[in-house]
Image (tube, coloured by chain):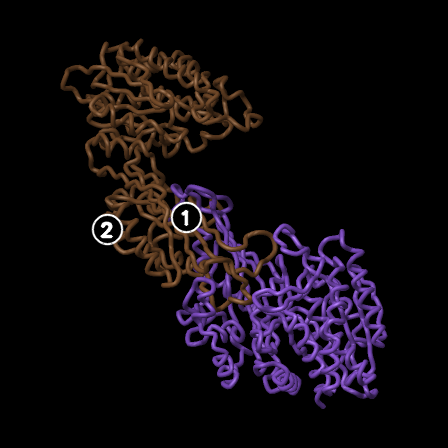
Chain colours: A brown, B purple
Amino acid sequence: MSAPNSVLEHIDAQLDSSVTHLFELLRIRSISTDPAFKADCRKAAEWLVEDLKSIGFDASVRDTPGHPMVVAHHGGPSENAPHVLFYGHYDVQPVDPLGLWVDPPFEPKIKEVDGQKVITGRGSSDDKGQLMTFVEACRAFKAVEGCLPCRVTILFEGEEESGSPSLVPFLKENAEELKSDCALVCDTNMWDTDTPAISAGLRGLLGEEIIIKAADRDLHSGYFGGVAANPIHILSKILADLHDDKGRVTINGFYDGVKETPEEILESWKALGRTDEDFLGAIGLSKPSGEEGRSALELAWARPTAEVNGITGGYTGEGFKTVIAAEASAKVSFRLVGDQDPHAIRRNFRAFVEDRVPEDCSVEFKEHGASPGIQLPYDSELLNKAKDVLSEEWPKPAVMIGMGGSIPVVGDFQTLLGMDSLLVGFAQSDDRIHSPNEKYNLKSFHKGQRSWARILAALG
Amino acid sequence: MSAPNSVLEHIDAQLDSSVTHLFELLRIRSISTDPAFKADCRKAAEWLVEDLKSIGFDASVRDTPGHPMVVAHHGGPSENAPHVLFYGHYDVQPVDPLGLWVDPPFEPKIKEVDGQKVITGRGSSDDKGQLMTFVEACRAFKAVEGCLPCRVTILFEGEEESGSPSLVPFLKENAEELKSDCALVCDTNMWDTDTPAISAGLRGLLGEEIIIKAADRDLHSGYFGGVAANPIHILSKILADLHDDKGRVTINGFYDGVKETPEEILESWKALGRTDEDFLGAIGLSKPSGEEGRSALELAWARPTAEVNGITGGYTGEGFKTVIAAEASAKVSFRLVGDQDPHAIRRNFRAFVEDRVPEDCSVEFKEHGASPGIQLPYDSELLNKAKDVLSEEWPKPAVMIGMGGSIPVVGDFQTLLGMDSLLVGFAQSDDRIHSPNEKYNLKSFHKGQRSWARILAALG
């Protein structure tokens, strides 16, 4: 079914009221990483529980070893109606440096910036404003129809900005209660102010650290230069070998499980009009450095990578020291897509490194996490239903994009609860999340509510 | 001529007296790098001037902007007699950590260690003990013969342990006064306690720092991984390319001016019996890493190198950060031999690097010194006269070796005064110079005096 006009009109009529509601939540200083705000985090959870109860949810604050979760359930039109889990987080980033805020971070207001109305304040975009778009859509359905078009479970986390230490244990302990047909996650951006975006793929992440050890002490390069193994040379060779001259990663089996992106999706990305020069010009570069013959957007959204994130060895201070270091190390991460197996890649990477370490030297490895990529089929019903109704709401049709980075909760939903996630969000790239002067466009807040009403109806 | 037995016998008879003399000098705390010991440095210079005057030298303390020089002249048997310049330094290293000294560093004594008599104290080996071997040889000639076998100029520096800032200006200003037929430098080691060594070659040193710059800021590897140029990758590729798979340096023209070491010299090095396993086993390695098919000794003494002495880029702290750095840098040094031109190599290295930097990235270079290698012809008269008389003095024949490191004053003598240097010293590798419990073998001090007497006679 499509969303009744009466629900959409109710949303329009109640916009001021929904803003007032959001402001109450924004005034709560729920900074999760700073213990000084522990009580504020609980207060935000309690506020959400009360608000959800007022719409008829069976809502409760659920304790964890850290900040509490909010879990709420609402029935649908029937016991067998489709069941969705909505995820958001009520905690926010710290506000330092406070002096750079034009308006106080916890005193939200609406103001006009660059010709558009925005809601100011910490959390306005990330993620309180976004999660309230969903709550308001539910409120409108309840007010107009008396019920929701599907069964809805809500999970609000209070530790997303501080590493989500309680999330996985909580999902495991409450798997039966939380498991739904799919998850809805509202923590992402639109493509631009007129174009909604659905993130169909998220790259996974594998982190490795390698420490090459040669002589049993630092050496004088006068006495030992040209004779003793230099671990920086060995490391440089390994890192240089990671890519061939076409920019492809050379580790054995690295591309196993990587699928080509469908031609029509590539065409739709091309149609977005963001050229390689646009993408790279913004950071002072001009030419994609990865696999040859692919656009910057494809490389960032749909291709796996090997990147060295840090390297150190020998003397790195001012001036010069003629030393041959005893060891040198690098941190290397891999972005993974499709069905690439992070554990197989870790094994093959280590073999790749070991093959290149001379017999009288050694290598030590450290693990830094391993999560697979996530890719919904571009022809999935979930994605396409959402795409259709988002395209009705916004001036331009919705686009299915990829995300270069990871959203761990999406992987956890898949791994622990067997659920796909629909990633739809209404933030803009200039929302300054995590920075001073965070804002959320009033248009995002308004049409976001309407968008969720349409999506709930479509899934119902 | 060879040294008269009467002179050698006088040295033997006066050994106790020469030790007493040395102890006076060792008691002076002439630590050049610490301003607190400025007066002590001058005191050491003045002590040397008085001592040299007592042997008939025309000696004086010569002021510099730093610690003073000592310059002294003595005529030879005739006005046209060969003229040698002897160089040494009266300044010493600091003594920290004081708690590790078994005997106080400035209270020299003779004690028996591991079955041999040694002189203890800071400067006993580096370089007061060594320079006094020459002074005592002169004293003996004067006592027995009434004159020296050649014209002798002495230059003692007081800033060798703190970078010799005054040396080059002083050599330039006093070039006419100091210029001699050759220089004698006593600041090196013997091969072992029975085998004297002459250093015929010193590797030069070229230092370069390269800073690769890519994007105009640090990037998130989720958003930009696989698209944006990674300066650590570019740097790794450059450094990996520096050597081919035979261990040869690949910079254009790098081996121009490098001569092969004569076969008989290589044979003599082989005869020393220090295998690659000996050389490398001492530092926990087993296989030479440089140019294939050459021994560790040849690689260290006679072959040029490219070594990365330091590298840094991106995140190098604990844990992991998915960053693509804006820049990465490395310090690279080249040890040079024969007629390699450091300036040409600098130019060619920079071209080599620039060729490997993508168009939208850049590289910045910093200079860290450039000095050519020094190589006396193995068939030079100076070397061979010294070799013959040293072989008469010591239980085993003298060997001509190379030195992997640099002694800047030798380059300065060549460049500024047009003089070759004869590098002969009687220190041992276990003398702990620059460390607590420095010592000088009494046998080195005694036979060192006899050695110089023989060399002076041979050159006269």
Task: Name the foreground residue: B80 vs B216.
Answer: B80
> Sequence order check: which comes first, mark 2 or mark 1?
2
Q: Which mark is residue A331?
A: 1
SS at circle 1: strand
Is residue B358 visible in the rendered structure shown here?
Answer: no
Horizontal relation, residue A72 to residue A242: left or right: left
Whole-percent x and y of residue B395? 58, 81
Q: Classify 10 Å Cα crowding around label 1: few (below 14), some (14-19), many (20 and above).
A: many
Q: Residue at x 58, y 63 (%)?
A: B207
Horizontal relation, residue B286 to residue B430: left or right: left
Whole-percent x and y of residue B403? 57, 72
SS at circle 2: loop
Quick check: B361 above or below B451? above
Q: Which mark is residue A256?
A: 2
Say which quadrant the N terminus of chain B sits in: bottom right
Task: Name the foreground residue: B311 vs B26.
Answer: B26
